[in-house]
């Protein structure tokens, strides 16, 4: 069993389920499987899914990859996502997916690269 201190970002399970809403999807994200797991709500609009992914991509794939992106980043501003340095609970509990780009300028280009492979 891996201790929390030795866990890496790639070890951290990220569960995503999405349900359709009028303008896109409401996604529930669970980071971790232990008692410290956190739950987040992410809103994904249709335009963001179209712009950031290849045709036919699902919103849950975009959200999961977006959380991986966030968990890999050094802490900046009010976001503190790097698991080795900050707790999972530092991730905002509810946000619209495009807000990530306000904190990380490279977000859209990096997610497009990852999602269009």
Image: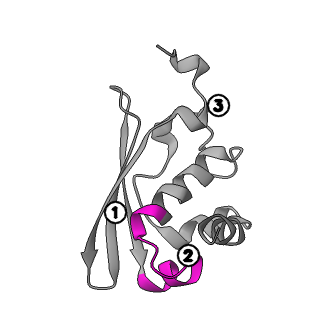
Which mark is in front, 2 or 1?
Answer: 2
Residue at the (31%, 68%) spot, across then down: 26
Helix, strand or loop under label 3: loop
Which of the numbered marks, if any, corresponds to residue 53?
Answer: 2
Extent of the magenta region: 46-61
Q: Residue at image x 38%, y 29%? A: 36
Element carrying mark 1: strand
- Residue where numbered disc 1 is placed: 27
Q: Is residue 34 visible?
A: yes
Task: State left or right for residue 25 relative to residue 66.
Answer: left
Q: Is residue 87 above or below residue 104?
A: above
The nearer-to-camera label among 1 and 3 is: 1
**Image location of residue 77, percent across then percent down:** 67, 52
Residue marked by disc 3: 85
Near-viewer residue (90 or 35): 35
Query: Comparing marks 3 and 2, which lies closer to the viewer?
Result: 2
Q: Is residue 60 magenta?
A: yes
């Amino acid at each position: 069993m891996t201790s929390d201190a030795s866990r890496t970002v790639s070890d951290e399970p990220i569960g995503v389920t999405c349900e359709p809403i009028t303008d896109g999807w409401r996604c529930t994200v669970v980071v971790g499987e232990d008692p410290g797991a956190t739950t987040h709500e992410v809103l994904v609009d249709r335009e963001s899914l179209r712009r950031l992914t290849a045709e036919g991509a699902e919103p849950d794939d975009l959200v999961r990859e977006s959380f991986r992106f966030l968990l890999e980043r050094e802490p900046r501003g009010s976001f503190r996502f790097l698991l080795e340095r900050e707790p999972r609970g530092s991730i905002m509990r509810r946000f619209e997916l495009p807000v990530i780009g306000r904190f990380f300028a490279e977000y859209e280009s990096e997610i497009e690269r990852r999602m269009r492979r």
